[in-house]
Amino acid sequence: MRYRVASHPNTPATVLRQLARDSYVATVRVVASNANTFPETLEVLANHPDFTTRLEVVRNPNTPPCALAQIVLSTQNSGNTPNQTVDMLKSAFPGVHNDVLRSIAGNLRTPIEALEILARREFVSATPDSQAFMPPTTNNEIVRSQGEFNYNP
């Protein structure tokens, strides 16, 4: 029931703020994607361990620039490969980590400092591996995605 309330387009932001603390991750994801969610709530969800939730935060037009920068900074210490922890496995598919970063790079509200961090980082592999299931994703691909998304700042 809480999931359905969180996904409804008329749910007030005050209710969404409460649902952002729900124990069911699908409800939290829907709160992160709801256009009525307060920017302050999205800032809190930017720290959520579930990468899919963070992706929804990045895609939400209400997400403030500081939350986008916060997500970039939190991924800065993850090294050159996506984190393969239990939190990653909760996200449904392994490409979510780079999807978050691509979406941040493509968001017109992303602060220049965060874009500079993304431009200097390499996310999967420096050299192509012809045997790899997924092709390498480099900082060049992340930078090229800048401007793909048409958000109004």
Image: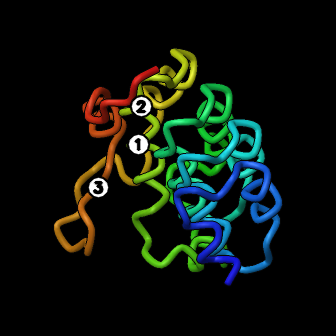
Identify the colour scheme used.
Answer: rainbow
Q: How many marks?
A: 3
- Of all residues, the one furthest to the front in this rendering is 10
Circle 3 Cα neighbour tier, 10 Å, few/some/many (<14 / 14–19 / ≥20): some
- Could you say whether the residue bearing mark 2 is in a helix, strand or loop? loop
Q: Are marks 2 and 1 in contact (CB under 8 Å)?
A: yes
Residue nearest the viewer, comparing 115 with 109: 109
Q: Measured from the top left, where is residue 23 in percent x and y?
A: 79, 78
Height in image: 6 above or below 100? below
Left or right relative to 94: residue 43: right
Q: Which residue is mark 1?
A: 103
Q: Mark 1: which amino acid?
A: Ser
Residue at the (56%, 79%) spot, across then down: 89
CA distance separating discs 1 and 3: 17 Å
Density class for disc 1 (Cα within 10 Å; few <14, some 14-19, many ≥20) is many
Residue located beneath label 3 in the image: 136
Q: Which mark is residue 135?
A: none
**Label 2: how many residues lie within 10 Å, few (<14), some (14-19) or many (20+)?**
many
Q: Amino acid at mark 3?
A: Pro
Measuring from the top left, give residue 15's x and y in whole percent: 77, 58
Chain-order first, disc 3 or disc 2: 2
Q: Are marks 3 and 2 in contact (CB under 8 Å)?
A: no
Where residue 1 sits in the image (x, y, percent)? 67, 84
Which residue is label 2 attached to? 107
Residue that sits furthest to the bottom in the current view: 1
Q: Residue furthest top?
A: 112
Q: Nearer the viewer, mark 3 or mark 2?
A: 2
Asked which secondary structure carries label 3, the reply is: loop
Name the secondary structure under disc 1: helix
Residue drawn 49% across the image and 23% down it: 109
Give the amino acid type for the residue marked by disc 2 in the picture: Asn
C-alpha gap between disc 2 and disc 1: 6 Å
